[in-house]
Image: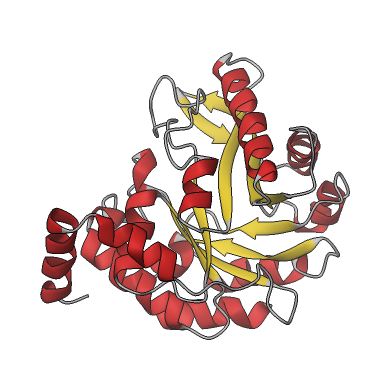
Amino acid sequence: MSDLSITDLTWVRATRPEAIAEAAAARSRRPLLGDNGRMMIVAADHPARGALGAGANPLAMANRADLLERLCVALQRPGVDGVLGTADILEDLLLLGALENKVVIGSMNRGGLAGASFELDDRFTGHRASDLERLRFDAGKLLLRLDMSDPGSLNTMHGAANAINELAERGLMAMAEPFISHRVDGKVRNDLSAAAVARSIAIASGLGGTSAHTWLKVPVVEDIDQIGRALEATTLPTVLLGGEVSTDPAATQERWHKALQLPNVRGLVVGRTLLYPHDDDVAGAVDAAVGLL
């Protein structure tokens, strides 16, 4: 991303805010799934929740020009189907022309700020279903972390059910990302055991008045031999999330490869692992992930 591009982007935002709606109206769209029946999505909705770190750099995602450059590189790679992000990032990409013929998924609840006392009361502060419909985007993603000892999780669960209903009314996919969570020394930690992942999947699958448009975004469990057991909890289409930047990319890819063999797993939704790889080769990291599909 050149300095000129960032200057132009800011100038357009300041002088022609209507350009965002114009770009959304003119954008070429495509089906959710490609010819191979798979989905490869790059995720970049972390900054709006205050989660800016990637790998050893606690402020990696704080540089918007750098993030946009990495996203543009990733979206240009063969086999990448689309992107998941908040309104500000997706609208930057719209203005840059980077979303043509891509699946676009808007992030809906970012109110559970990383490290906040109210983190698990994850309010819907991002895209609404009506925004996604107006912008001609394809889906909405919602985070559902459930801590049985934190009453804020009930608010999140209720908001998630409402979002699923509102998306379904518009024929838009709802991508629910469920976890069983708990606090350790004041920090929220997700339980990645097979039993906990299965429980979170079962709860998320039953949200809303219909599951016709619901997909699940789930982690690869700690014991890879148990991933099939966890996913037996649903018949809904499922994608795997990438999680933190791995110190062992080969092992991570092997885990993804094994999980991708399961019948209801349709693809990958990966963010920092692809955008901020250890060797800083975004194109190479994306191509390796696409190869697994």
Q: Is residue 261 left or right of residue 48?
A: right
Residue 18 in the image, given as x and y percentages of width and height: 26, 56
Q: Nearer the viewer, residue 7 or 196?
A: 7
Q: Nearer the viewer, residue 292 or 35?
A: 35
Does residue 55 appear in this view? no
What's the residue at 31%, 59% (across, down)?
Answer: 20
What's the residue at 73%, 37% (across, down)?
Answer: 204
What's the residue at 77%, 62% (across, down)?
Answer: 265
Residue 293 in the image, given as x and y percentages of width and height: 69, 78
Q: State which quadrant residue 70 falls in.
A: bottom left
What's the residue at 41%, 63% (across, down)?
Answer: 24
Q: Is residue 268 left or right of residue 196?
A: left
Q: Nearer the viewer, residue 134 or 37?
A: 134
Does residue 17 appear in this view? yes
Q: Is residue 285 above or below residue 61?
A: below
Q: Nearer the viewer, residue 183 or 260?
A: 260
Q: Quadrant of the N terminus?
A: bottom left
Q: Is residue 250 above or below residue 115?
A: below
Counting the numbered discs, the total is: 0
